[in-house]
Image: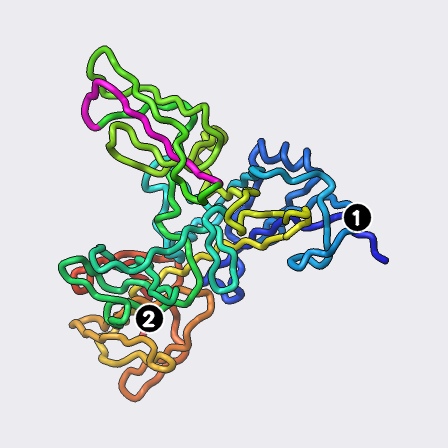
């Protein structure tokens, strides 16, 4: 009989469609100071191995009925209490990441971070995802190229042309949407505004009072609708700003409204004062939903495996030839088409729709008269510009060919 004295509490894997093996090597994952203490108190360890964060802890023999979800039946040596929180910071160490990832850079707004948590209760395609659920297509909404939606079956679609309430185009319109798959990917909805526990809140115009409302996660409903702060601060005169004190809140995600204006999702954690963190991973052990459970009622380890799955960016590919020669570019299965224009000095081939960037080259064939060249160079993340087509602005990958 084998005596197991160490078990897996949970695993977080980072995946990316850009890579042929799907494994994302672009981040370092480190525990917060508070989480380091939690790890120590629970006789646990947290180690990153390539694209995975693995958190294990000491276990003790269990002689009761085996768990149907965990037939190995490992019991934590130290009890995992409801409400346990473990926070990890994601450090990005690839400067080209946003070039080949279908995400806006959070650095465009100071203090923005990506936030991932098992409280999102996002199960899709056999994966337990930490990103928010992608919203369903709405005909009254505005979409631009790169936006993601899901249809009634949970299939993800990416916009390749703009649409809005005045000109709605559903996901069945292949001119406006391209089918991706049934995975779930991070979007701009996963971006939160980081705030320290005490900071200066600036009004759009001077105000005589501050009516502060902060909503947070309710473990009973699984929603962020529980009131944590509701108070009014009156000023002697109208002021342009005031010091907002959120020190009564635990670290985590909240919804902040002041005077009913500028409602925003925020993340509270004073350890982020450096401002260099790409994202935060919060893993909780809550009563509900089930993806936020680390042990069952026995309690035995459930050892969940969580995923963050990034989608590769699609760009317009623009080939520039040094000679003014007409021709064509062939793509396997005619999956993409290119338009050819010729000037007095050069020839251009521009893809009619965006093509996903990947580290696996496409086998493209360039035909110029009776001559064929294959394979030709494919787009890579090194060079990215913008191009306008049919009223939309797209990221553009430029490739120069010496033909």
The residue under the point 31% across, 68% down is 178
Q: Position of residue 301 (x, y in %)?
A: 67, 50
394, above or below 90, in the image: below
The residue under the point 29% across, 56% down is 385
Badge 1 crowding class, 10 Å Cα cut-off, few under 14, some 14 to 19, many 20 or more, is few
The residue under the point 39% across, 71% down is 377
Instruction: State which quadrant residue 248 falls in.
Output: top left
Give the extent of the magenta segment. 204-219
- Decide whether residue 208 is among the magenta residues: yes
| Residue closer to the observer: 90 or 64 | 64
| Residue closer to the observer: 179 or 328 | 179
Q: Please say if the residues under marks 1 and 2 sit with CB atoms less than 8 Å apart.
A: no
Badge 2 crowding class, 10 Å Cα cut-off, few under 14, some 14 to 19, many 20 or more, is some
290, above or below 127, in the image: above
17 to the left or right of 81: left
Numbered tag placed on residue 61 in the rendering: 1
Picture quarter with the N terminus? bottom right
Is residue 322 visible in the rendered image? The answer is no
Picture quarter with the C terminus? bottom left
Q: Position of residue 39 (x, y in %)?
A: 65, 37
Q: Which residue is mark 2?
A: 401
Q: How is the image coloured?
A: rainbow
Badge 1 element: loop
- Decide whether residue 226 is among the magenta residues: no
Magenta segment, prevailing SS (helix, strand or loop) = strand
Is residue 30 visible in the rendered image? The answer is yes
172, above or below 102, in the image: below
Nearer to us of marks 1 and 2 is: 1
């Amino acid at each position: 009989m084998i005596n197991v004295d160490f078990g897996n509490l949970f695993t977080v894997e980072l995946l990316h469609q850009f890579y042929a093996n799907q494994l994302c090597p672009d981040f370092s994952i480190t525990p917060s100071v508070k989480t380091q203490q939690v790890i120590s108190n629970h006789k646990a360890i947290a180690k990153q191995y390539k694209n995975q964060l693995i958190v294990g802890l000491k276990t003790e023999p269990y002689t009761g009925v085996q768990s149907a979800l965990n037939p190995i039946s490992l019991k934590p040596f130290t009890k995992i209490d409801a409400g346990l929180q473990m926070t990890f910071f994601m450090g990005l160490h690839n400067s080209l990441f946003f070039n080949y990832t279908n995400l806006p850079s959070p650095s465009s707004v100071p203090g923005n971070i990506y936030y991932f948590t098992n409280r999102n209760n996002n199960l899709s395609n056999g994966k337990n995802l930490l990103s928010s659920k992608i919203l369903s297509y709405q005909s009254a909404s505005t979409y631009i190229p790169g936006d993601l939606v899901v249809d009634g079956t949970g299939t993800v679609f990416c916009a390749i042309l703009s649409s809005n309430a005045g000109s709605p185009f559903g996901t069945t319109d292949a001119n406006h949407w391209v089918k991706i798959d049934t995975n779930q990917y991070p979007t701009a909805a996963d971006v939160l505004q980081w705030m320290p526990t005490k900071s200066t809140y600036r009004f759009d115009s001077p105000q005589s009072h501050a009516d502060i409302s902060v909503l947070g996660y309710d473990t009973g409903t699984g929603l962020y609708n529980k009131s944590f702060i509701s108070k009014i601060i009156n000023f002697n005169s109208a002021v342009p700003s005031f010091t907002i004190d959120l020190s009564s809140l635990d670290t985590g995600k909240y919804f902040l409204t002041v005077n009913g204006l500028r409602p925003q999702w925020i993340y509270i954690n004073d350890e982020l004062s450096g401002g260099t963190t790409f994202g935060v991973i919060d893993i909780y052990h809550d009563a509900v939903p089930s993806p936020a459970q680390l042990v069952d009622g026995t309690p035995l380890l459930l050892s969940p495996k969580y995923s963050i799955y990034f989608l590769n960016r699609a760009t317009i590919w623009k080939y520039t030839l040094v000679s003014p020669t007409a021709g064509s570019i062939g793509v396997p299965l005619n999956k993409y088409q290119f338009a050819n224009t010729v000037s007095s000095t050069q020839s251009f081939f521009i893809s009619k729709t965006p093509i996903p960037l990947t580290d696996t080259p496409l086998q493209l064939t360039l035909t110029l008269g009776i001559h064929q060249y294959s394979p030709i160079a494919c787009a890579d993340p090194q060079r990215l510009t913008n191009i306008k087509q049919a009223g939309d602005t797209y990221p553009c990958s430029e490739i120069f060919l010496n033909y």
